[in-house]
Structure formats: C-alpha cells, structure tokens
Image (tube, grey):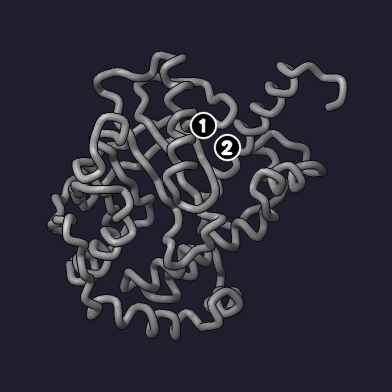
Amino acid sequence: MKGLSVSKKVGMRDDYYVRINKVLNHIQANLEKQFYLSELSAIGDFSQHHFHRVISAYLGEPLGAYIKRLRIDKAAQLLRFSDTSITEISEMVGYDTLSSLSAVFRKRFSLSPTDYRKKYGAKKSSDIIQLPEKVNFDFSPIIKTIPTIKIAFLRIFGEYAPEPIGKAWDKLFTFAKSHYLINDKTKMFGISYDNPEIGENEKHEYNACISIEKEIRPKGEIGTKELKGGKYAVFTYRGSYDNFPLIYQLIFKEWLLKSEYELRDNEIFDRYLNTPLDTEPDALLTEIHLPLR
C-alpha cells in the first residue's frame, strides 16, 4: 500500500471490513453447516488465494480455529443449560458424528461431552447464588413474541470490559448520527456471543447494535444484519452492567433450568433502555432476551 493516499488506504480498509462482516455473519448464522473456502471467499468477494490471510489477520487467529471455537463454545453452552441430546447438539454445531464432536471437545476441555455435562450441568441448579446488596433482580420474565429487527452493528473482539465496549458504541453512534439513523424509535442492543465461564477472554465477541428503519449501505466496521424474531423470555434488570455475569448466572441456573422452556438456536441479546451517559449505574435498565423454542 506504499504510495497510496490516506483516503485511499482508509477506503480499502473499510471495504475489507464490510466484506469480512458478510463472511462472519454467514458463519454465525449457519454453524450447523459445512463451510468451504470457495463459498466463504465468494460471500466476501475475495480471491481464494488471499482470503485466509486477510480474514485471519482480522480475527487474530486462523479462520478454521475461529469456526471450531464457535462450535465448541456453543456445544458447551448447550450442554450446560439445555436438555438437548448430545447427538442433536453435535448436529447443531456442524459435526456429522458424535465421535467427531467428542474428539475436538476433549482437546478443548479435557472432558468428553458426556462428562462435561455431568460435571457442569448437574451442579448448576443446586448452587446458591448470593446477590450483592444493591442488586434487586426478579428473575420472573415476560414470555413474548417479537418481530425480526433490522440492525446496524459494530463487532469487536476481546475481554468484555467498559472501555472497549464504550469505544464501540462511540463509533456506532458517530456513524448513526452522520447518516441520520437516530430517532425516537431507535432501540439499542448488545450481543455478547461468549459465556465468560466457557470462552477465552481475549477472543470474546461483542456487537454494539441499533435498530434501523431504512436500508443502509454497510461502511467500514459498521455492518447490517437482523435480530431474528420469535419467542423470547424477557427479563428486566435494573442495575450496573458490572453485575451482568451474575445476572446471567441467575437467569440460566435459577430460571431456565427450572422452567418448562428450552433455548432456541438464536442470539441472546440485551436491549438497553437508557445509557451510562445520563444515568447512574444503579439506575440503568436492561431487558435481557433469551430465545425460546
């Protein structure tokens, strides 16, 4: 890129981001399928020769390792918090046979899927979770059906921490304001793809998202996709974002496992009803959405 102007370099970088987002969106929405280099490179409009290097540089790991990690982490989540059979879980995360899943699962966790479920699934409903003094959370959700929502989003990787997440929101809002996307109907969402109890902190994925009412053209790090509609358990939490790991433990261990419901294969997401910009931490309001079958 030597000799290119700054604006030309920025334009090329932004074009790469848009095309990579298309590829990652496709992978996340189709983990049960087998992926082929020709297919993924075509989705991102990359040559097969350069595709692996470009997307691995963005992810910080080989694409195959990224896909394997998504599949194994999803399998671990289902083993912990659902009654879905291990054979069915294997198919849901893209493994043709249970033995194939077991081999990669054992490498990651040093346990077979069966032993992992026995170790982490059996104790989760009997643990007593102590709430901090200022946290008052009623884990009685409203069960409702919501429509599919079009969103603009910015994807980041790393530890779930206020500073990088705050920067992601700053970038998203800068884009949204410059493209006149913000109005009284705009909703704010956060998608945390990884369970901190399972995944590797430095590789966690978070999406800052806003609802959009018109078609927009993705630009740079800002992509577009959909939050799928359907049945959700919606919990309302009032309090600091610092307590999210604990609140999620409560929801999964004290509600989901004792309920008649089972998780559906869609993203879990948060809707932020106010923001830290004008609200004290203890007064922040969040709706947590669990997709249900």
Q: Position of residue 275 (x, y in %)?
A: 29, 34
Q: Secondary structure at mark 2?
A: helix
The residue that mark 2 highlights is 22
Secondary element under disc 1, as helix, strand or loop, is strand
Closer to the chain start, of discs 2 and 1, is 2
The amino acid on which the numbered mark 1 sits, given as a three-letter code, is Gly
Asked if the residue under mark 1 is in contact with the one under mark 2, i.e. CB atoms within 8 Å, the reply is yes
- Mark 2: which amino acid? Lys
- Identify the residue at horizontal 53%, vertical 43% (top origin): 156
Residue 9 percent across, percent down from the top left: 74, 23
Q: For mark 2, does the 10 Å Cα neighbourhood hold few (<14), some (14 to 19), or many (20 or more) residues?
A: some
Residue 3 left/right relative to 239 = right
Seen from the viewer's position, the closer of residues 175 and 136 is 136
Q: Tell me the mark number nearer the camera, choosing from 2 and 1.
A: 1
Residue nearest the viewer, comparing 162 with 35 = 162
Q: Residue at x 63, y 54 (%)?
A: 35
CA–CA distance in space, label 2 to label 1:
8 Å
Packing grade of label 1 (10 A; few <14, some 14-19, many >=20) is many
Up/down of 47 relative to 217, above or below: below
Q: Is residue 234 shown left or right of residue 81?
A: left
x, y percent for residue 217: 52, 21
In this view, the residue in front, 70 or 174, is 174
> Which residue is under mark 1?
223
Q: Which image quadrant is residue 210 in?
A: top left
Q: Quadrant of the C terminus?
A: bottom left
Q: Is residue 87 left or right of residue 21?
A: left
Which quadrant does the N terminus fall into? top right
Q: Residue at x 48, y 21 (%)?
A: 175
Q: Give the image location of residue 144, x and y in percent.
A: 17, 46
